[in-house]
Amino acid sequence: MRENRNSIVKNVFHLFYSTALSSIMNAAALIVLASFIHTEDYGRFSVVLAFAMIMAYLSEAGLNQIVLREGAKKEAPIPEIMASFIKLRLALTLATLVTGFLLIHWIYQNDTELIILSYCLIIPLVTGISMQSISITYFQMLEKMQYSGLIRIISAGLLITVVMVGKWFYLDHKIVFFLYGSAYFLAGCFGIYWTAKNLTFSFKSSFYKGLRKNWVPFMVTGLLFILLPQIGPIVLEQTLSWKEVGFFAVAYRIPQALQQVPFIIAGAFYPVLFRLFQAGDHQEHVRKSISQVKLMGLVGMLAAIPFYHLSDFVISLLFGERWMEAAFLLKLLSLVMVFQGVSIALGDGLTTRALQSRRMIIQAVAVASGVFFYTVFSRFYGLAGAATAGVLIELVLLFGLLFWHPDRSFLFKRAVFPYLSSFFLSLLAVELFLSSFPILAFFIHFLLILSLAGLDKEWRKKSMEFRRKSPLYQKWKAKFRKEAHDGVS
């Protein structure tokens, strides 16, 4: 299985359809949930979900990337690595749940409702994500993304199913939150079952010492990364009402869900970049990093455009009139997707070059800035200030990662500057002349950004190569040659 690894293109394809489908279903689950629970309850749900996602990460603590790094090495002992990985995950999950609930009881000791909701949602969700993560990491290490995609699709399918059941049977919101977490748990069970069918290992095997190497930078960086989208609801709960937190959460959930789209590309590039660095091929590593920045930046921009220009329509269609206050927030927060794709790619370039400590420091600055931005801006400017803070955090992250990247001049000239400047110049032009016609503005802006791929020499060359290698083109070419030969004969 290891020898028959997929190509980047094939892995991107598998991750694209699976992540797109699972993201749509996850978003649909949140939309259905918002349609039948109270705004205040949705605000509480957002805060508890933020804690759940932080705890889910702490149950992984950066080990996924360590496993991918070690698995990329030549003649890597996969069973030994996975056995050590699973044992560590079990210990981390248990420790995280105990510590997390002690913290929740301390912070919200006067809010019994929120504590009960925490138990209903967090225990099944964190356990399920931990199991899913083990399976997804294993198949990602083998560069067999179709199996990782299958696990994500099953998880999302179960999620939308249980939320719909909650709506149809008018279940109490506590039961719905428990079912929400249980969907992740059931998908995790499937992932473990599928991994066990493809992997044979022994828990009695000796601990793989390579997992300890540079673990702390990976752990801290990952924690800081997961904190970035979660600190919003947690901080805003101290400065805004539960209802306002609900409005912010509805607007922020959309770009947060679509964040998975650039991760599709990152997931396919990640093991390849690690392998190139391990092989000492610096030039090819730089070329692949530039391609990743371009592709993830382009995808992030295309994802942001409809939600920027059609925010009123999207909120009205998906959530209804009672959530319209979130429309302007969605317009601002859609810009998060523009910067996220580029910054994730830049960060992966550092990680795969054994410069994880730099990424860790930059993300620490971004998290600290985020707490300050959310607190100050929301106090003075309310929800609009909170949305602005979300965008500013991404700018801090982007500039920091670019400034501290060893190949910053190449990346800036060939990818970051041309793509971001094209997006914002076209946005300015479209807003100037077509702001009164949002649908037309969306189509024109989308086509302008899509044309970047056609104007880029690298993408034109790659598309020509892909076309020449495609089975359909080869079949047509053989048929043409045969007809030409028969005509000469």
Image (cartoon, rainbow, N blue to C red):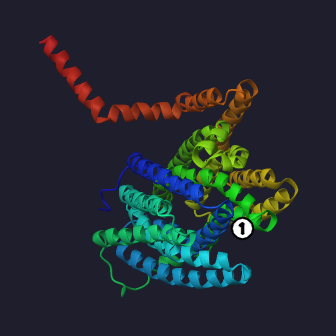
Quadrant location of residue 483? top left
At numbered mark 1, what does the secondary structure look like: helix, strand or loop?
A: helix
Please report the residue visible at 62 percent of the width from the left and 26 percent of the height from the top: 440
Q: Is residue 412 above or below residue 347?
A: above
Looking at this view, is 281 or 218 the one in front?
A: 218
14 horizontally vs 222: left or right:
left
Number of marks drawn = 1
Q: Residue 60 in the image: state x and y as whole percent.
A: 53, 73
Q: Residue 427 in the image: state x and y as whole percent.
A: 70, 33
Quadrant location of residue 349? bottom right
Q: Residue 46 in the image: state x and y as whole percent.
A: 64, 64
Please report the residue visible at 58 percent of the width from the left and 39 percent of the height from the top: 302
Please report the residue visible at 86 percent of the width from the left and 60 percent of the height from the top: 379
Amino acid on which the number 1 mark rests in the picture: Ile
487 horizontally vs 453: left or right:
left
Q: Is residue 106 above or below residue 459?
A: below
Residue at label 1?
234
